[in-house]
Amino acid sequence: MKLRLAIPITVFFTLTYFIACRHIENNTYAKTVWSQNQEQDLWEKATTYLFPQSKEQLLEETGATKAQIELGKTLFYEKKLSLNENQSCNTCHNLDNYGVDNEQFSKGSRNNTIGVRNTPTVFDAAFHYAQFWDGRAKTVEEQAAFPILNPNEMAMPSEESVVARLKAMPEYIEKFNKAYPDEMEALSFANITHAIGAFERTLVTNSRFDDYTAGNLDALTPKEKKGLRLFLDLNCAPCHSGSTVGGLMPQRFGQVGNYDDYTGHPNPDRGIAEISNAPADENTFKVPSLRNVVHTAPYFHDGSVETLEEAISIMAKAQLNTELSNEDILSIKAFLNSLSLDDSAL
């Protein structure tokens, strides 16, 4: 793809072009005039790391049927899946609020219980290499079982108790028989989590940035393009890569220094090492997706950072050993805003 933009021919525009290039070299990105080559170079570099998403790919992986997806949607909103019938998946992963509850830690079904990690968005989660901050579940189907049985979350005592509760409702027996017609015991815990996962695979967001990577180079504003170039030139993209702009690998939090050096919060969470007990996994977490990130505060696994500006600054220091100017932080934030699902689509 080549851009068809007018090439500057006067001395004035030649000087402007030279100044713009100097700005890029100096990493200030202020008042940059975008040339044809710069536009093309930015687009090509962006699409090397980041690219549009495919919902069809996700559905093909499990071969879910329309009936299974519809059942999963019903179950996603079903509060009877929690001990006190006061919580559903949607309570913490609110689909009307970019898939989060904006709490540092989500409250559980039982009184005085609370989660131990910040709730990530469910949107686009099916693209991730694994689920949860520590990657303990490989798929959204496997992930769906954990909150239902977690004593700090939905707190159901066993798989059998979940099945028994739904079997007491004739409408669910009918829905499961329709969704899984070839199974003797259609209403099973495995099919509950499969259906929820099938529905979650449809929760794919599209944004102006997808339009940009698909070839509409006018989809981003000049400020957003400055932020994108900074994001790429600072080497944020090797970790925050792919269609989800993250979620595809684990990474140690604090390549330079320790987590609490930058946040001011002690960090007893060992991350993946909580599961593996391997020293190499200490303070290692799944790299979060940055889609819809401007709407999913607070940030990081412990929800300790309230603003995106502070989160950007901390990541630059802790992972890249870089001190960003306020202007650079706001430019990157502008780019991250282009990753948002439009409000009208919620």
Image: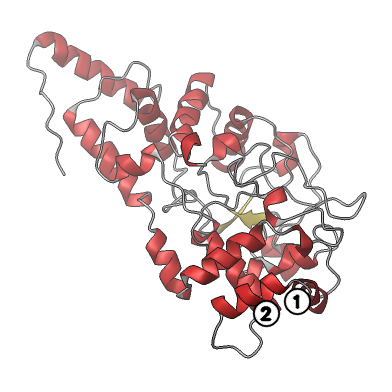
Residue at position x 71%, y 49% in the image:
92
Residue 59 spot, x, y in % from top left: 44, 67
Q: Is residue 31 left or right of residue 185?
A: left
Q: Amino acid at mark 1?
A: Lys
Q: Is residue 164 left or right of residue 73?
A: right
First in sequence, mark 2 or 1: give its number: 1
Q: Amino acid at mark 2?
A: Leu
Q: Quadrant of residue 200?
A: bottom right
On screen, 264 above or below 151?
above
Residue at position x 21%, y 37% in the image:
40
Q: Nearer the viewer, residue 336 or 318?
A: 336
Q: Which residue is mark 2?
A: 187
Q: Nearer the viewer, residue 206 or 6?
A: 206
Q: Quadrant of residue 326?
A: top right
Residue 134 spot, x, y in % from top left: 67, 61
Q: Which residue is mark 1?
A: 167
Residue at position x 65%, y 59% in the image:
76
SS for dot 1? helix
* Measured Cα–Cα span from mark 2 to mark 1: 7 Å
Visible in this render: residue 138? no
Residue 303 spot, x, y in % from top left: 72, 41
